[in-house]
Image (tube, rainbow, N blue to C red):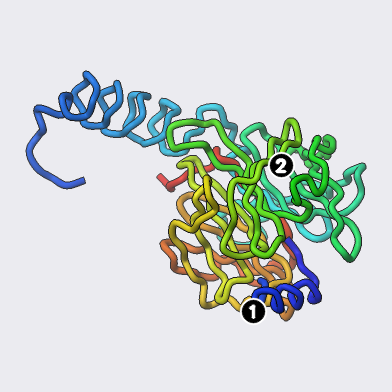
């Protein structure tokens, strides 16, 4: 996302803020206590220790032995993707040692809709979905579908701007639970406070499901069924896990090291950590911060790019093996 100075001033007036396993003996009665007829205590129908029924113990439902829920995914679908203010589309490898290695340019986006990228998400289908806006007032243009491998802009999706009051919004895909690969796209608008909704990318239908505690969120999700937001206008900025049915915060990580005069920001979950792409009005370019267990460190400083959108699919790993 990106915000000009005047929008922060309006939000400041409205909010009074700158808008921005225990060891022991074997349990021989486990089958009778967990509700199934196998020999574990997982409450499922296999013999592993988790609660799914795929025969492994990794906690996902894909039947392999890792924890990324990715049996239908390519390696490309496990990366983070970002877009900058010049419409340059990159893959981002969180494990790369330097920014030059981490950001790999794929293409400069050229969408027939016109406008420029505002926010972004990535689905398990191999496409990124980018909200496009135009002009100094950031007027909604629509949501474009982009191929993550080639950067080709495919088409505008059926979403109609201002449906249910959603014109400028952050967005992120999340699985419906930790035991399925079915996923939902969540969006949060720029109302004060923001509304939390879902967007059916195939039909354009929007459904509001709750209200957030603040405004201007960006979202990311994962294969554990968790929805997380980055809220730059909080004082201090924070990462919060969001209840998908209400918008209430489940837990949060205040990021006291960040000032809340955000000019451009984006957000992604990968490998159990969060990556915040953040530029203030006084920064020359975007800095990338890694947040692990609530502790923030600088991952890549002064990248030379102004990142306005980031997306990661639920194919991404939830832990690093």
Which residue does the numbered mark 2 point to in the structure image? 128
- Badge 1: few (under 14), some or many (20 or more) residues near its Cα, within 10 Å? few
- Position of 185 with respect to 223 (left or right) is right
Which quadrant holds residue 33?
Answer: top left
- Position of 228 with respect to 147 (left or right) is left
Sequence-wise first label, 2 or 1 = 1
Which residue lies at the image location 55% right of the left edge and 42% below the top edge? 174
- Position of 292 with respect to 134 (left or right) is left
- Is 17 above or below relative to 106? below
Circles 2, 1 touching at the beta carbon (< 8 Å):
no
Q: Can residue 179 be seen in this view?
A: yes
Tell me the number on the disc at residue 143. none
Q: Nearer the viewer, residue 273 or 96?
A: 273
Report the Cα–Cα distance between label 2 and label 1.
Answer: 35 Å
Q: Is residue 101 visible?
A: no
- Is 308 above or below relative to 127? below
Q: Which of 204 and 130 is in front in this view?
A: 204
Which residue lies at the image location 67% right of the left edge and 63% below the top edge? 216
Query: Residue 12: horizontal and vertical position, in percent?
Result: 69, 77
Which residue does the numbered mark 1 point to in the structure image? 16
Which residue lies at the image location 10% right of the left edge and 34% below the top edge? 26
Which quadrant holds residue 35?
Answer: top left
Looking at the image, the residue that sits furthest to the top is 37
- Badge 2: few (under 14), some or many (20 or more) residues near its Cα, within 10 Å? many
Q: Which of marks 2 and 1 is in front?
A: 1
For the C terminus, the quadrant is top left
Q: Nearer the viewer, residue 220 or 209?
A: 209
């Amino acid at each position: 996302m990106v915000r000009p100075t005047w929008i922060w001033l309006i939000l400041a007036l409205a909010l009074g803020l700158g808008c921005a396993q225990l060891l022991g003996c074997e349990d021989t009665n486990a089958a009778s206590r967990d509700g199934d007829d196998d020999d574990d205590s997982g409450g499922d129908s296999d013999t592993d220790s988790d609660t799914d029924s795929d025969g492994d113990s990794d906690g996902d439902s894909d039947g392999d032995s890792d924890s990324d829920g990715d049996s239908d995914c390519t390696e490309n679908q496990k990366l983070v993707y970002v877009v900058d203010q010049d419409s340059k589309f990159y893959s981002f490898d969180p494990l790369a040692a330097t920014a030059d290695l981490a950001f790999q340019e794929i293409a400069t986006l050229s969408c027939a809709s016109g406008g420029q990228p505002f926010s972004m998400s990535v689905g398990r289908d191999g496409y990124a979905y980018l909200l496009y806006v135009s002009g100094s007032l950031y007027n909604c243009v629509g949501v474009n579908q982009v191929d993550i491998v080639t950067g080709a802009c495919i088409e505008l999706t059926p979403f109609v701007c201002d449906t249910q009051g959603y014109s400028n919004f952050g967005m992120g895909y999340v699985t419906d639970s930790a035991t399925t690969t079915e996923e939902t796209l969540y969006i949060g608008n720029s109302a004060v406070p923001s509304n939390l909704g879902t967007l059916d990318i195939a039909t354009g239908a929007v459904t509001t499901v709750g209200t957030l505690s603040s405004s201007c969120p960006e979202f990311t999700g994962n294969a554990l069924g968790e929805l997380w937001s980055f809220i730059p206008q909080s004082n201090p900025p924070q990462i919060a896990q969001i209840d998908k049915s209400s918008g209430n915060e489940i837990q949060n990580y205040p990021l006291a090291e960040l000032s809340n005069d955000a000019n451009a920001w984006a957000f992604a979950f990968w490998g159990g950590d969060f990556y915040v792409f953040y530029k203030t009005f006084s920064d020359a370019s975007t800095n990338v911060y890694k947040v692990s267990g609530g502790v923030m460190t600088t991952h890549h400083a002064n990248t030379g790019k102004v990142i306005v959108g980031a997306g990661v699919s639920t194919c991404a790993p939830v832990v690093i093996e």
